[in-house]
Amino acid sequence: MRWSRWLALLLVVLIGHSVVLFALHNAAAAMGGIKAMEEPLFTRMLTPAAPPRLAPSLPVAPPTPPPPPPGLFAKEFSPLVADSVGFDATETIAWLKPEPVVDLPPLTVVTATSSLAQLAGLAMETFGVKSSVTVAVQAGLTATVSTTNYGSGTATIESWPVDTKLNYKVTGNFRGPIDGKASVTWLRTGEKYQVLLNVDLGLVGVRMTSQGRVKPASLWPEIYEEKGLKPRRLRLDEEALAFEDGSTLKRPVGVQDTVSQFVELTQRFATGRAILEEGSVVHIPLARPGGVNDWYYDVSAEPQLPTRLGGNYKEMMAWHLTPRPVTNARGPITMEFWLVPELQYFPGRVRITIDKETYLELDVDTILQR
């Protein structure tokens, strides 16, 4: 009888202990996880429409050059306009004596190649601030190579998209054909935002959330979270990034995370602050819980992207953003986008590639807006 009482007491203590631990675990998860914003009532379905006409970029008059050294004159030239990386062109500047009083000196030639543009590209982008590289020509003589490709558009907090939910049909391959669904939800309340990516493949699901502040020129992520088989988290403080292994790194200018880039890219081009052109390159520093990398997307035009928005087949023009191989990549996963001007530059298609045999393809099904 006495042993039965002790056994019953022991069971009560163990059960109570388990209940307390479970409650503490749930409380910690609730405090540490991102609290989802309340979704609004989406009242309309986005339909294809011609993109707004953006004011063309007006050329800026170059500054008046300094007077040439005595006995020489500087041949006027237009600065080489290149995108952030990958532009292969040559600009030649020659200085000649005005009169052949004596033998002419040899021509002085300056060549700006793609390697120079790549060096310049590391200091440009996201906020629309012009950047340049100065090339030494002779003592006291310089030439400036522009490395930006920005339009004349402007942005305010009010210019960001209204609350939007993009629903996608998912196909692909992972040890066989894949059939599922996904959604990207953009929510904004004042200066605070959330972007949520949900992928549902039946037995497997992934949820990625970005939360932070909206600035006129760019999103400012503060927390990024991945929930799947193993929850992972990244904190983006004002001055530094805090990774899941406890390490920190100075916050790169214009840094985004895996899902904030969905809306960041859309906003850049919808407002005309950045111009999509065949052969141009888009640069974004992307941070994940394991580290940060510079991503470069090559831009190409796809005149006829097949879509079935709302069940209606239509071919629409899209800009295809293809990622370049990432230096010191922290995993094999890449994402490429097809941005559709008729859909407010939201992605009409997204491809997530792990390797040649494993990939997901998200094709837009419906776009709902508040």
Image: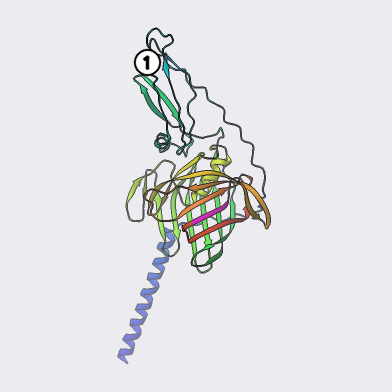
Q: Is residue 349 a member of the stretch shown in magenta? A: yes
The image position of residue 325, as x and y in percent, is 43, 49
Q: Quadrant of residue 137?
A: top left
Q: Residue furthest top?
A: 101
Q: Is residue 276 left or right of residue 43?
A: left
User: What is the basis of the colouring in this image?
Assistant: rainbow
Q: Is residue 133 a member of the stretch shown in magenta? A: no
Q: Which residues are magenta?
A: 347-352
Q: Is residue 196 left or right of residue 70?
A: right
Q: Residue at x 51, y 63 (%)?
A: 173
Q: Residue at x 40, y 19 (%)?
A: 107
Magenta-highlighted stretch: main secondary structure?
A: strand
Q: Secondary structure at mark 1?
A: loop
Q: Residue furthest front?
A: 103
Task: Tell me the residue that label 1 is attached to.
Answer: 105
The image position of residue 246, as x and y in percent, is 32, 54
Q: Is residue 359 above or below residue 108?
A: below
Query: What's the residue type where badge 1 is placed?
Result: Pro
Q: Residue at x 43, y 8 (%)?
A: 99
The image position of residue 231, as x and y in percent, is 42, 61
